Image (tube, rainbow, N blue to C red):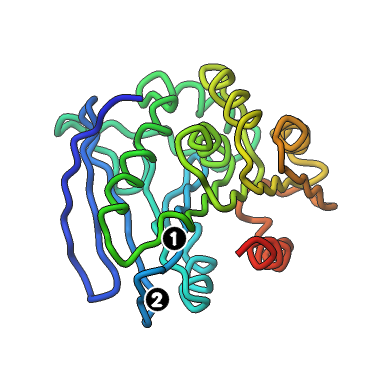
Amino acid sequence: MKKILLILVFISTLFANEITITSDDGFKLYAWLNKPISVKKSTPIIVFVHQFSSDHKTWSELAKKFNVKGFATLNVDLRGHGESIYQNQKKNKIIVEHRMEYIKSALVTSDKNIAFDQIPADLIAWIELISEDGTLDMDQLYLFGSSLGGVSILPLLSEYEVKGLVSISAGKSKKLTQDIDMALAMSMTKSLFIASKNDPLGAADNSIEYANKSISGTSLIISDNGHGTVLLPKVEHYIFSFIDSIK
């Protein structure tokens, strides 16, 4: 993974900080760190990673609920998405597409300019940055991802002793396959892979595959045809039960 230059910028309220980092390839990346009202030195932290053609806000409601439960949350804007669209001070953003029949082609075309295989390195940079915060307990690190984010968090299992991982409608990445297979085969992290039975992008098969390759993985396939965080209303209670079982 490439070494990242870290730049910390605190804005907003006492319990919510806007943070930026700059990657080696020049992307200025944004994230938002939110802490529960009562912050302790042992506060667990969840890193939320959104799907293609979305941004950090897709996880906002779930993140708030975890804040109430005593978790700190970091919601990132992936490279080329949301606020993270400037590379070397020039705009470089994805092709925004929400129609499922065109998502794959938009993702492939966007990848050529954005380099999605560098997302795990970006996420490592975020984690290294927040690990400097003395109120956060990095032994209680959780990773949540959806679609593109759901596959991008998997290589991190080789880098950290993650407490728990939730991946919704996980995608595939040829460039990251070897790293992912190694991470799943070696990590003891409790992992939950969620997808709809009739996912339009084949995420059900991906979720079962990842669960089978992992040491402590479970797949949850629900009767639906949705993709990504649109499934949250149907699976939220499963997620809370899963996290409660491993806290």
**Labels 2 and 1: the sequence-earlier one:** 2
Left or right of 3? Residue 165 is right
| Residue at image location 41% in from the left, 68% down from the top | 43
Please, what is the three-letter code of the amino acid marked with disc 2?
Pro
Which corner quadrant of the image does residue 90 belong to? top left
* Front-lying residue, 186 or 232: 186
In the rendered view, would you say 45 is above or below 94? below
| Residue at image location 31% in from the left, 40% down from the top | 125
**Residue 198 x, y percent position in the rendering:** 81, 41
**Residue 173 x, y percent position in the rendering:** 57, 24
* Front-lying residue, 91 or 209: 209
Residue annotated with mark 1: 45
**Residue 150 x, y percent position in the rendering:** 57, 41
In the rendered view, would you say 59 is above or below 52? below
Please, what is the three-letter code of the amino acid marked with disc 1?
Ile
Do residues under tags 2 and 1 come within 8 Å of each other at their CB atoms?
Answer: no
Left or right of 78? Residue 225 is right
Which corner quadrant of the image does residue 24 belong to? top left
User: Which of the numbered marks, if any, corresponds to residue 36?
Assistant: 2
* Front-lying residue, 164 or 83: 164
Which corner quadrant of the image does residue 92 belong to? top left
CA separation in Å, label 2 and label 1: 10 Å
In the rendered view, would you say 160 is above or below 133? above
Left or right of 86? Residue 171 is right
- Of the 4 image quadrants, the one containing the N terminus is top left
- Of the 4 image quadrants, the one containing the C terminus is bottom right
User: Which of the numbered marks, if any, corresponds to residue 159?
Assistant: none
For label 2, the SS is loop
